[in-house]
Amino acid sequence: MISVLFVCLGNICRSPLAEAIFNHKLKENGLTDKFKSDSCGTSDYHIGELPDERTLQCASDRGVAVNHRGRQINRVDIREFDYILAMDKANKKNIENLIVKYGVNHDQVYLIREFQPNAEELEVPDPYYGGMEKFEEVYEILDESISHFLQFLKQEHQMYV
């Protein structure tokens, strides 16, 4: 089973939404038995909390289920997940620092927008201090990025469905 971890700062906006979109696309493509996914944050700000209400609303409006509680990335995550996708450069750097700290070899850490064709920038903006329109923008970015990431995974792992 291929494992994918989505990471942002607090794990209540971007990364749980990315996880939910990924799981939704897996279900649509009949791939739920081939992958496992999760999300977490590099900070400990929101451990145990439900995702932001605007994240839940944005996903619900599109028929995407979010089932997550905030948690912080840990050593087991670094060792266990095949792919780690960060939402921005600061969180990617934090992940890379943890890889060094824990002495783990991990070469599949990406910014999620690296998979988005013609992305204007490589970071997913944090919508936390914005209105609903910022969450809508983040949803669209993640939806496109994850579609292309899933295509990458299918090719990488020779999945012909």
Image (cartoon, grey):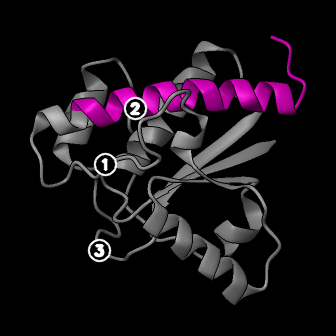
C-alpha span from label 3 to label 1: 18 Å
88 shown above or below 29: below
Secondary structure state at the residue bearing disc 3: loop
Between disc 2 and disc 1, whose residue precedes? 1
**In front of the other: 119 or 51:** 119
x and y, in percent, of residue 148 in the image = 62, 26
CB under 8 Å between discs 2 and 1: yes
Range drawn in magenta: 136-161
Image mark for residue 141: 2
Drawn side of residue 81 relative to residue 74, left or right: right
Tell me if residue 23 can be seen: no
Which amino acid does the dot numbered 1 rest on?
Pro
Quarter of the image that includes the N terminus: top right
x and y, in percent, of residue 154 in the image = 79, 25
Q: Looking at this rendering, what residue extends furthest in the top direction?
A: 161
Q: Which residue is mark 3?
A: 45
Q: Residues within 10 Å of mark 1 (few under 14, many from 20)?
A: some
Between disc 3 and disc 1, whose residue precedes? 3
Q: Is residue 139 magenta?
A: yes
Which amino acid does the dot numbered 2 rest on?
Ile
Quarter of the image that includes the C terminus: top right
Q: Main secondary structure of the magenta part?
A: helix
Q: Is residue 61 magenta?
A: no
